Amino acid sequence: MREIVSDGTTLLLTTQYLEEADALADEILVIDHGRELARGTADSLKSRVGGERIELTVSDPNQGPIAVDLVRPYAVGEVTLDAPKGAVSFPVDADADPLPATVRALDEAGVRLAEMSLRRASLDDVFLALTGRTTEGSAEQMKEAT
């Protein structure tokens, strides 16, 4: 596909595998239920939901809501919680170096972490922000509709 495109041919790729779109597409159009939700380069779409994300899992899932309240001041967008897993995710301003302050706030409140990472936003994050559901949920809904 890259060879065809490098020769000047325009190629339209339809996929629900957003990693594939991220790797191959110059421009991405996000469509949901026949409606255009967003259009742009992978980087421009990712920047809409925050370029970097902190993801953490608390040792005790019951402390998930506490963790959400504690990290909210460091988030530059919506903080999400997967309550059964105790997994918290939120976009951050990487230039503000939010990781140390987040760790301190959780530690001072006695919230123990099982894991924590800082990562770049993905196109899956973009889809979730635009639709309120994951691409897996979208694929399952498509199967049910057929």
Image (tube, rainbow, N blue to C red):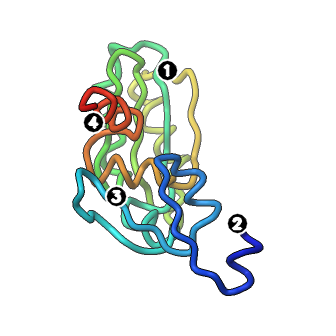
Q: Pick whichever of labels 4 and 3 is earlier in the sequence.
A: 4
Above or below, 123 relative to 142: below
Q: Quadrant of residue 72?
A: top left
Labelled disc at residue 30: none
Name the spot of residue 33 as percent of width and height, x first.
Answer: 23, 51
Q: Give the Cα distance between marks 4 and 1.
A: 15 Å
The kind of residue on which mark 2 rests is Met
Q: Quadrant of the N terminus?
A: bottom right
Name the spot of residue 126 as percent of width and height, x first.
Answer: 39, 55
Above or below, 92 relative to 40: above
Q: Pick whichever of labels 2 and 3 is earlier in the sequence.
A: 2
The kind of residue on which mark 4 rests is Asp
Label 1 sits on residue: 112
Marks 4 & 1, CB-CB < 8 Å contact: no
Above or below, 37 relative to 82: below
Residue 138 placement, left or right of 13: left
Residue at image position (63%, 64%) is: 24
Residue at image position (49%, 74%) is: 27
Between 64 and 48, the residue placed more toward the observer is 48
Q: Which secondary structure, mark 1?
A: loop
Marks 3 & 1, CB-CB < 8 Å contact: no
